[in-house]
Image (cartoon, rainbow, N blue to C red):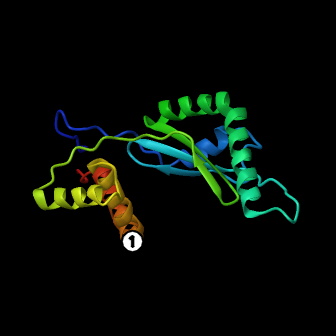
């Protein structure tokens, strides 16, 4: 017997283990200089592509390089909009997640659109005071932004631990899918 979530519980979208390969195959040849990086969570798929860096003269400044890279990204966004929408609609249907596109060019990157998911949480006064301190100090404009800042900070400083935790969770999910062996 397979595990079934309780009635009214959030249902998970289908697995997206093959999303990177599928998206690479669905993207027109020549869009990117390497296979896109695909980042998947339960709500969103972000597709990061790298485009060629514009060639500039040897005496170009860092500001010139940054401007040229930003221009290349902008042009890619304009030139591929209709085709990106077509691919995104197919991906959204297949994997039941929103799709966001980002492009990297040299040292410059731009995430065009992305999902900003509301998160319901209950915080006790000490946690709210931490958020309010960040707001009062001008680190964040709101409690929501302060919480996002805290999550990013934890993510940056615990990436190895989070990677190990995600790996363990994948193993648990595989076992849950298999269910107990029945005779």
- Residue farthest to the left? 125
Where is residue 130, by image quadrant?
Answer: bottom left
Q: Identify the residue at image location x=17%, y=38%.
A: 6
The residue where tag 1 is placed is: 157
- Mark 1 secondary-structure assignment: helix
Can residue 167 be seen here? The reply is no
Residue 40 spot, x, y in % from top left: 46, 49
Where is residue 56, by image quadrant?
Answer: bottom right
Q: Identify the residue at image location x=43%, y=37%.
A: 97
Name the quadrant of the N terminus.
top left
Residue 62 spot, x, y in % from top left: 73, 63
Q: Is residue 26 left or right of residue 138?
A: right
Q: In this view, does 154 lie above or below 28?
A: below
Q: Identify the residue at image location x=64%, y=45%.
A: 24
Q: Is residue 76 left or right of residue 118?
A: right
Q: Is residue 34 left or right of residue 88?
A: right
Q: In this view, does 137 lie above or below 157?
A: above
As rendered, which of 75 and 21 lies closer to the eye?
Answer: 75
As rendered, which of 69 and 117 lies closer to the eye?
Answer: 69
Where is residue 138, by image quadrant?
Answer: bottom left
Q: Identify the residue at image location x=17%, y=33%.
A: 7
As rendered, which of 16 and 88 lies closer to the eye?
Answer: 88
Q: Residues within 10 Å of mark 1 (few under 14, many from 20)?
A: few
Can residue 60 be seen here? The reply is yes
């Amino acid at each position: 017997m397979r595990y079934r979530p309780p009635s009214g519980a959030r249902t998970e979208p289908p697995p997206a283990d093959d999303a990177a390969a599928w998206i690479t195959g669905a993207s027109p040849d020549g869009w990117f200089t390497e296979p896109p990086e695909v980042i998947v969570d339960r709500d969103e798929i972000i597709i990061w592509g790298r485009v060629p860096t514009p060639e500039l003269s040897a005496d170009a400044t860092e500001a010139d390089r940054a401007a040229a890279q930003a221009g290349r990204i902008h042009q890619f966004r304009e030139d591929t909009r209709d085709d990106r929408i077509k691919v995104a609609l197919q991906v959204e249907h297949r994997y039941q997640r929103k799709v966001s596109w980002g492009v990297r060019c040299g040292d410059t990157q731009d995430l065009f659109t992305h999902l900003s998911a509301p998160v319901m949480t209950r915080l006790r006064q000490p946690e709210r005071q931490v958020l309010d301190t960040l707001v009062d100090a001008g680190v964040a404009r709101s409690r929501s932004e302060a919480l996002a800042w805290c999550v990013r900070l934890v993510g940056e400083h615990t990436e190895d631990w989070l990677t190990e935790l995600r790996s363990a969770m994948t193993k648990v999910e595989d076992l849950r899918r298999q269910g107990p062996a029945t005779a």
